[in-house]
Amino acid sequence: HPTPSFGQASIGRFSTRLDNGNEGTQYPRELPACWQTQCAGLWQIGLQETYKKSRLGFHGETVFTEGKLQRACESRTLVLITSDRALYMVADTDPVTTHQQSKQKGRKFPAPIPLGALFQNAVWPHAVARHPWVNLKKITIGFGFQRLALHFSPSTDYERAVLDNELTYVLTTANKLRTIELLQHFQGLAKDVMSIGQVQVGHLAIENDDKQVLDALSEAVAPDSVGVVLHYSILEQRWKRGDRGTVRRVCVVTDTNIYLLDEDYEGDGSEPFVLSSTDPGKFGNVRYRVVDAAQLSQIDSVQAATADPKGVTVVIRPLSVLQRMHNWRLVSGDADGAEKLVEDVRKAMKMAAM
């Protein structure tokens, strides 16, 4: 948890030095260092039960497999704050914190800053995790720059005993520009900490998971082949009726098909996971489950939603007259992402029709 004397923290346009008993000195910064993002924390013991929810199918129904209720990891909404020495993950308002706060009186740890709070109220942010940059060992760039995985080594013997040898956080930005911004900022801070003068005291590996994603997609859609991936985006599915909120999905467009999938991560608690000594870097690897799929020739229309600039509706024709049409009501990370999804689907349809 955050304590004083942990370096220079950057929030928004200004920085304040965190020193015991000293008044903070503010000065402008070129890069803002405060972001709100979705995050899943991964470690060998898995997430607590409160971080999981029932898995929902395409129509919003609860999914059972062999009579057993299927669970999905509940991503947390966090505010990321960086200092020159560490990364802080601060609780923000999301379904989990809202549920926890409804069961208790007062503001108990960890709680988000109340929505109506003002700066003059001096509400102290609750950091659910703090990781020094010197412990950042690897950054994995997600397929299509839709997410980042941060791999930390434990900073204390207690963390090592409880959480084993690796702590991984998957930041689902669902936005290429945001992902690049975070990558450059994290990489710069880690590089500064790991270099003392001319002496290199650490090494940060930068990787991408393209091969692992394609292998996981091939496994999910087997016996069909994936083909050429023309579009990949993390988004949300919503429903026209019912109070079910939204569910995180992945939309993949290939040269022959369009897929709507669940994306889980090794170690997120949705399935039992044991770290293999022969593959210690497995944390954060993706797994897919097909929610719905169709051939490109089955797409009747794809268009942006009229009320929401981030919304996209894909209408799928059935293969049989006995089946109903499927309406994919999707919400992209931003308006640009929605436009790109519509554009890529239409391009794929034209290519398939040639």
Image: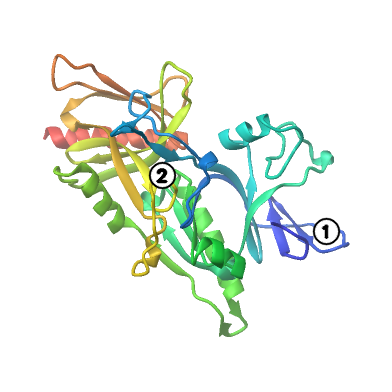
User: Percent position (x, y) of residue 55?
Assistant: 39, 33
- Secondary element type, mark 1: loop
Mark toward the viewer: 2 or 1: 2
Report which residue position mark 1 lands on.
24
Residue 22 position, x and y percent, is 87, 62
Q: Residue at x 54, y 45 (%)?
A: 37
Which quadrant would the C terminus be assigned to in this image?
top left
- In the displayed structure, 230 sits above or below 205; it is above
Report the residue at 31% width, 31% height from top.
Answer: 67
Q: Earlier in the sequence, mark 2 or mark 1?
A: 1
Residue 71 in view of the camera: yes
Indicate left or right for 114 with 146 as reference: right
Q: Nearer the viewer, residue 283 or 49?
A: 49
Residue 28: percent from left, percent from top: 73, 56
Note whether residue 188 is visible.
no
Q: Tag 2: Cα neighbours inside 10 Å, few (<14), some, or many (≥20)?
A: many
Residue contact between numbered discs 2 and 1, judged by CB atoms under 8 Å: no
User: For the view shown, which residue lies furthest in the bottom direction?
Assistant: 198
Q: State the mark number for residue 270.
A: 2
Q: CA distance from mark 2 to mark 1?
A: 43 Å
- Picture layout, residue 216 above or below residue 334: below
Please name the residue shown 41% across and 55% down the image. 284
**Circle number at residue 228:** none
Which amino acid, mark 1?
A: Gly
Number of residues whose C-alpha sits closer than 10 Å to that of mark 1, classed few (under 14), some (14–19) or many (20 or more)? few
Asked whether 35 or 159 is in front, the reply is 159
Q: Is residue 230 above or below residue 330?
A: below
Quadrant for residue 190, please give it: bottom right
Left or right, residue 261 beside residue 159: left
Compared across the picture, whether 71 is left or right of 159 comes to left
